Amino acid sequence: MMLELSDLDAIKDTALRNFEARVAKADPSKPNEIECEAARLESQLEQLYSFTALLARRESDMARTAELWAGLARTCDLFAGRVFRLAQQHALNLSAYDRILDIRNATEELRALHSR
């Protein structure tokens, strides 16, 4: 069985849906619950990064490889936006946000490398 681009989209959509559902159930008086959900979303982004790297290694077309990384950069932006809003909503400093941005920066470097 081979991983495909549509699989990455399905994983992303499921991760966001589950994140939103768990955050909605989290007790706002317990910041550790919210921090845990942000960390879980970050972990799922790390998995998506790994899956994208796997697909990129198998891709022979540089432009297509750049598209893979660009897609992951958009996913990073989406995840970062959700975590940022959550942090503002609950007045928290979520370290997951910074780590998501680190993944986004690494992703953007790979996209730029394959765009040349």
Image (spheres, helix red, strand yellow):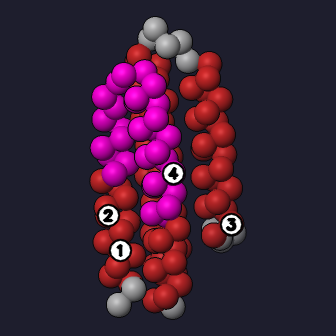
Q: Single out the mark in the foreground, 1 or 4.
A: 4
- Pointer 4 residue: 78
- Pointer 3 residue: 6
Q: Earlier in the sequence, mark 3 or mark 1?
A: 3
Q: Position of residue 14 (x, y in %)?
A: 66, 46
Q: Which residues are magenta?
A: 72-101
- In the rendered view, would you say 30 is above or below 58? above
Q: Earlier in the sequence, mark 1 or mark 4?
A: 4
The amino acid type, in three-letter code, at marker 4 is Leu
Q: Mostly what secondary structure, the magenta segment?
A: helix
Element on which disc 3 rests: helix
Q: Earlier in the sequence, mark 4 or mark 3?
A: 3
Does the magenta run of residues contain 57?
Answer: no
Residue 4 horizontal side relative to residue 91, left or right: right
Instruction: For the residues labelled 3 and 1, say whether their Cβ atoms are less than 8 Å apart.
Output: no
Q: Residue at coordinates 30% horizontally, 44% vertically from top-left?
A: 98
Q: Quadrant of residue 112?
A: bottom left
Residue at the extreme top of the image, as rendered: 29
Alpha carbon separation for disc pair 1 and 4: 18 Å
Marker disc for residue 106: 2
The amino acid type, in three-letter code, at marker 2 is Ala
Q: Position of residue 102 (x, y in %)?
A: 30, 53
- Pointer 1 residue: 110
